[in-house]
Amino acid sequence: MTNIAEQAIQIPDLELGKDVLYLTKQDVLDLAITRSEILDITRETLVEHGNHRYEMPAKIGVHPYTEVFYHAMPAYVPGMNAVGCKWIECYPNNPQKFGIPQTTGLMVINDVESGVPVAIMDSTWVTAMRTPAVTVLAAAKLHPGAESFGMFGCGVQGKEHVRYAAEALPGLKTLYVYDNREAAADALIDELQDHVPFTLVKGESPEAVTKSAEVLSSATVILKEPLSVVKDEWVGAGQTILPCDLNTFWDPRIAQRADKYIVDSIEEHELFAGMGYFPDGLPAISAETGEVIADVKPGRESSDQLIVNSNIGMAVCDVTVGRAIFDRAVAKQAGTRLAL
Ligand SMILES: NC(=O)c1ccc[n+]([C@@H]2O[C@H](COP(=O)([O-])OP(=O)(O)OC[C@H]3O[C@@H](n4cnc5c(N)ncnc54)[C@H](O)[C@@H]3O)[C@@H](O)[C@H]2O)c1
């Protein structure tokens, strides 16, 4: 990433403080930033977070309906010259009701030196990319050499988790996928089997997947009352569970009895608990994901430990990826210049 600590951003054809670069989802896609690049940026971001070199207040939000949230996600990562804010919404019923994604949003990237906004971009791609990047980096660290992975939820996140697993988990032989809409699991396998080096298997049931995979992740829905789809008795010693949907999919007893409960952000989890998302109480937290990635705190300490690592999503990851998108867009003269 370009080091611009000493000077304000220079943008050809764009006057700082007067113009802003607008990037549509297609503009962002056309930049062709690779998953490998996103993994590098995300790893560096997690190391910065783990060393507590960041500013990221817990998300503030508004909630027009039950189970719906809008979040403002500002962050500043000094070491990566990244500052900005993502404004997202999550409407779990959007796919059924309107045929549109659960999660959409916009991101603003600012110039650290002058503070002015320099880019506004669709944040769908950023969210779809940075979330599985965190999961697979954590999986590689907490469960090195895993040969089997189980993915619950075959939507936007599920598909990207499979692609990212192919990038970051070289030992994988089998990846089980499960979705309560069977067609979603079929579609994922049809679309991705030729692009990943491991075998994709449609799981027969949540129980079968849970009992077959060493590492498990879920990206389904986030609800206040846990669905408890995965039962405590199906989970065994030595497994690593990485939910992206808080504790919705899992029997709350699993995280409560885990040998380690690691979260991406303690503050964020406490905030969600305060909103009523952990009706059985927030489990005792051992470390933050970034601290484990940065080797500030230990991750797995024996092969029989049950580890739950909940990553609800951090603005630090959004703004560093957003900054990389902006830098690439400037280099490629992409996007539309708009007057502020
Ligand atoms: N942690 C993060 O940083 C982060 C980022 C983005 C999204 N999310 C969350 O991840 C989840 C998925 O997001 P998405 O964009 O992939 O949504 P999506 O709608 O594209 O996919 C969700 C999939 O989960 C399936 N599903 C729902 N309930 C299920 C159940 N009980 N059993 C099995 N499958 C079920 C749906 O059929 C769908 O295919 C949402 O809860 C979202 O809020 C988390």
Image (cartoon, grey):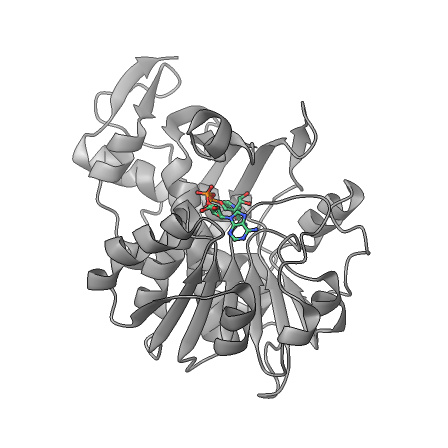
Q: Foreground residue, 15 or 48?
A: 48
Image location (x, y in percent) of residue 4:
36, 42
Q: Does 330 sit above or below residue 43? A: above
Image location (x, y in percent) of residue 314:
55, 48
Label count reads: 0
Q: Does 16 sit above or below residue 190? A: above
Q: Farthest residue in the top direction?
A: 339
Taking the image as drawn, is residue 297 in sight? no
Taking the image as drawn, is residue 75 in sight? yes
Name the side, left or right, on which 275 lies relative to 47: right
Quadrant showing the C terminus:
top left
Which residue does the image show at 81% across and 56% down from the upper left?
281
Image location (x, y in percent) of residue 214:
50, 77
Q: Foreground residue, 264 or 310?
A: 310
Which residue does the image show at 56% across and 57% down from the upper left?
49
Name the side, left or right, on which 284 lies relative to 308: right
Name the side, left or right, on which 169 lies relative to 234: left
Q: Foreground residue, 86 or 216?
A: 216
**Rendering quarter of residue 295:** bottom right
**Rendering quarter of residue 89:** top right
Image location (x, y in percent) of residue 106:
45, 28
